[in-house]
Amino acid sequence: MRSWFFRHVDDPRIRAVTFDVFDTVLLRNTKPERLRFFEIASELTIELAARGYPVSKEAAFHARALSHEIAYRTAPMNRFQREAKFEDIGKLVARALSLSDPSLVDVIQEVELRYEEQNLRGNRAIIELLAEARSRGKKLFFLSDMYLSNAQVRRLLARAAADLTVDGGYVSSESSLSKHAGGLFDLFCESEGFAPHELLHVGDNAHSDVASPRAKGWNALHLPRGKAFQWARAARELHTTALLKRLLP
């Protein structure tokens, strides 16, 4: 992989490398989203109980799952906000659980961020390649389609990829533009002053990280998760369905 990667990076026309964050530099385990939400809900009930707000795991799980769906379905209806935001999800969870104290929105977000810190791990092979690319004079930025804020993504990177220095980063939640639709790539060029052909993007998603930037004139490399991981995640999805049927009314 190293020689293949640097054949592209060392092209003298390339001035900067951008990378996807989740499942590229920060690797998730095989837990499906629904299982992650259930485990987050379990942690949240403990945190809320300690503050005098007893909530069942079932209620917390359904609140998190439903709030996620509502946030993503309604964001495009707002002309000024096309992407879901973590703060909005937190507010929806609080409302669903009848939590009137506004400070609890921060608690909801903090519980989930701590969970992410515990469950994400750095992809050492990719981190080392990116760090070397920067040492060779290339600027380094992250681009993420994610409801987390820029600062929250940086926090997770600092935890699992502490030795990776970046020159900046862009997230869809703050720009209301995404890699998937292509707008985030346009925004990056306009903001940073690069021409598309001067940029190399790397990531795991065939559309958002490869087809979309290439359609904008960028160079792009596909770094997908392996087949074994995909099979393990699919198997765990089936297990999660059975598990939640037993645990949830």
Image: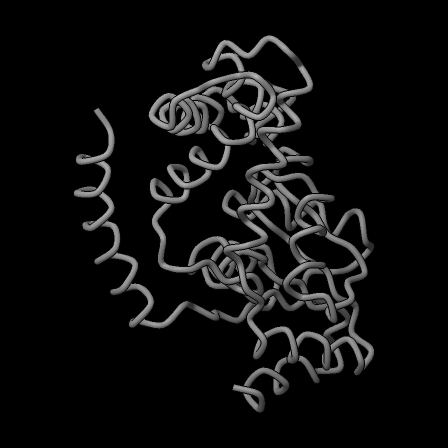
Q: Is residue 147 above or below residue 77?
A: below
Estimate the x, y position of residue 103 in percent, counting from the top left: 69, 19
Q: Is residue 41 above or below residue 73?
A: below
Front position in the image: 151 or 236: 236
Q: Quadrant of the C terminus?
A: top left
Front position in the image: 128 or 83: 128
Estimate the x, y position of residue 62 in percent, counting from the top left: 36, 24
Left or right: 141, with 210 as reference point: right
Count the labels in the image.
Answer: 0
Estimate the x, y position of residue 222 in percent, counting from the top left: 48, 69
Left or right: 139, with 22 as reference point: right
Left or right: 74, with 10 as reference point: left
Figure coloring: one colour
Give me the residue at 47% from left, 28% from top. 45
Give me the residue at 56% from left, 48% from top. 179
Q: Is residue 74 above or below residue 32?
A: above
Q: Is residue 144 above or below residue 158?
A: above
Give me the residue at 54% from left, 64% from top. 121
Estimate the x, y position of residue 248 in percent, counting from the top left: 24, 29
Front position in the image: 240 or 224: 240
Give me the residue at 77% from left, 47% from top. 190
